[in-house]
Amino acid sequence: MVHMDSLDRKLLRALQRRADLSQAALAEEVGSSTASCWRRMKALEDAGILGPAVRLVDPRALGKNLDAICQVRMKAHD
């Protein structure tokens, strides 16, 4: 278990809202220096708390209006 203080929790909340914030903007939002913010983010990444940053695609903007997940179980494959 990793010890997290209030600044770490602020970082996580801010990143959950806007993962695309620059280091400077993130540091300003949480009330920290840019260097301290970077070190804390790196420590959270190294601890496995922060995973890779991703960008989500809006399927409707691409004309994709339906997502389907299907699971098939078979007793035999013949």
Image (cartoon, rainbow, N blue to C red):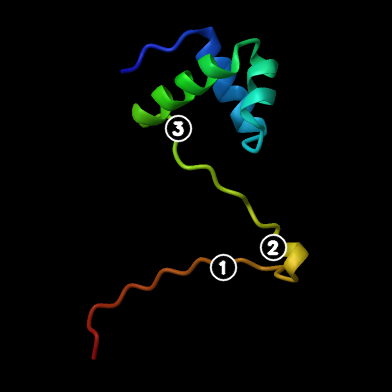
In the rendered image, the vertical position of residue 60 relative to residue 8, given as above or below: below
Circle number at residue 59: 2
Q: Along the horizontal axis of the image, is 48 left or right of 76?
A: right
Q: How many discs appear?
A: 3
The residue drawn where x is 72% and y is 68% is: 65
Most foreground residue, 26 or 71? 26
- Please tell me whether mark 1 sits on a helix, a strand or a loop: loop
Question: How far is disc 3 from disc 2 in space, using C-alphas?
Answer: 25 Å
Q: In which quarter of the image is the C terminus?
A: bottom left
Instruction: Indicate whether 67 appears above or below 26.
Output: below
- Mark 3: secondary structure: loop
Q: Mark 1 points at which residue?
A: 68
- Circle 3: residue type: Leu
In this view, the mark in front (2 or 1): 2
Q: Between marks 2 and 1, how big is the CA–CA gap?
A: 12 Å
Quadrant in which residue 10 is drawn? top right
Nearer the observer, 38 or 29: 38
Q: Where is residue 75 in the image (x, y as percent from the top left)?
A: 24, 78
Among numbered discs 1 and 3, the one appearing first in the sequence: 3
Using the rendered view, name the quadrant where residue 14 is placed. Answer: top right
Q: Which amino acid does label 2 sit on?
A: Pro
Q: Name the residue under label 3.
A: 50
Seen from this angle, which residue lies furthest front? 35
- Which of 35 and 40 lies nearest the eye of the viewer? 35
**Residue 42, quarter of the rendered image:** top left
Residue 64 point in image, percent of width and height: 70, 70
| Circle 1: residue type | Ala
Q: Considering the image in quadrants, where does the N terminus appear?
A: top left
Say whether disc 3 or disc 2 marks the residue closer to the N-terminus.
3
